[in-house]
Amino acid sequence: MTLAPADWYSVRRAVNGKPSTYRCPFCNQHLLALTEHVLVAPEGDTTRRRHAHTTCTLDARRAGSLPSLEEWKATQPRPPSLLSRVLHRGGVAVDD
Ligand SMILES: [Zn+2]
């Protein structure tokens, strides 16, 4: 596929724009801008967005090759919370 590699992708419905023809990055087939389709943007970067068939995009989502920001965030290690950092440092002084 010709979509830019990225950790996550935003997908939104394309509002019908110019009567141009695009090439879907998933199936490599032509796509008429005036038909129902979606815009796929790597990491939300709209300058690298691609017009794609709705069905191709749904297939890619189902196959796991098009994670959303929320899905990507869920795979990232969480930074330790402030409380656990303070406790591990042993810096908590409690007066009786
Ligand atoms: Zn397609």
Image (cartoon, rainbow, N blue to C red):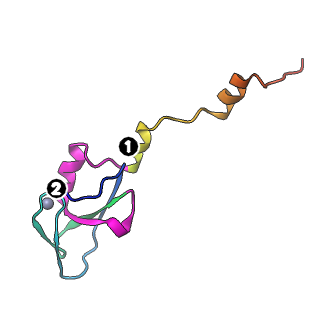
**Amino acid type for the residue under numbered disc 1:** Glu
* Mark 2 residue CB less than 8 A from any atom of ligand 1: yes
Q: Quadrant of residue 33?
A: bottom left
Point out residue 43 in the picture as x, y percentages from the top left corner: 39, 56
75 displayed left or right of 53: right
Q: Residue furthest left?
A: 29
* Placement of 87 over or under 82, stated as above or below: above
Give the SS element for disc 1: helix
- Residue 59: where, in percent of width, then height? 17, 49
Q: Residue at x 29, y 58 (%)?
A: 4
Q: Which residues are magenta?
A: 43-68
Assign the C terminus to one quadrant of the image: top right
Residue 71 locus on image (x, y percent) = 37, 43
Q: Nearer the viewer, residue 22 or 57?
A: 22
Q: Which residue is mark 2?
A: 56
In the rendered view, would you say 22 is above or below 78?
below
Q: Residue at the spot x=30%, y=53% of the render? A: 5
Which label is found at residue 71?
1
Residue at 9% from the left image edge and 64% from the top image edge? 29
